[in-house]
Image (tube, rainbow, N blue to C red):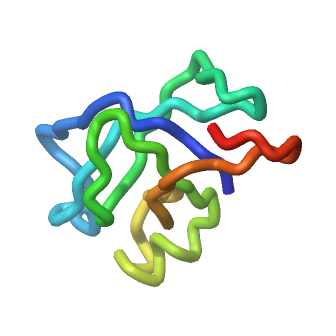
Amino acid sequence: MFLAQVEGTVVAAAKHATLSACRFLLVRRLNADGSLAEEPNVIVYWLGAARGSSVILSTDGDISRARLGNTTPARLVTVGLIDHVQAPQGEAR
């Protein structure tokens, strides 16, 4: 699992049959210091995250297979929306 920030949405002209009802977001991983990673990721989401939201992502393909079927190619899925992060030093981000 890791934290990421939503950068936008992704619209697919064609997609795998198991993903026909799914929406996609473009996200960037949040580093430990709160900065954004360079490389973006495309994720499957169903929790209603919007641009600028921070989300918790799972890299465990079992979650997407349980929801979308055993043949789905999806692996990165949103498992939570973040209100705030409490840093180990006691500072909220």
Nearest the eye: 24 or 36: 36
Residue occupying image coordinates x 42% and y 72%? 71
Quarter of the image with the N terminus in it: bottom right
Closer-to-camera residue (92/18): 92
Q: Provide residue 81's location: percent of width, then percent of height.
A: 45, 58
- Location of residue 53 by image quarter: top left
Q: Position of residue 91 (x, y in %)?
A: 75, 40
Relative vertical location of residue 25 with respect to residue 48 in this rendering, above or below: above
**Left of 50 or right of it: where is 4?**
right
Quadrant for the C terminus in the image:
top right
Give the quadrant of residue 51: top left
In the rendered image, the vertical position of residue 70 relative to residue 36, given as above or below? below
Seen from this angle, which residue lies furthest left? 13
Give percent across and percent down for residue 37: 62, 22
Write the residue at 40% across / 66% down. Answer: 72
Q: Is residue 35 left or right of residue 25?
A: right
As drawn, is 4 to the left or to the right of 43? right
Vertical order, 42 against 45 (above or below)? above
Q: Is residue 59 left or right of residue 31?
A: left
How many numbered circles does the render carry?
Answer: 0
Residue that extends furthest to the right in the rendered view of this protein = 89
Residue at the outermost front position: 90
Quick one: 19 or 89, which is closer to the camera?
A: 89
Q: Residue at x 81, y 46 (%)?
A: 90
Residue shown at 34%/58% (left/top)? 45
Q: Residue furthest bottom?
A: 66
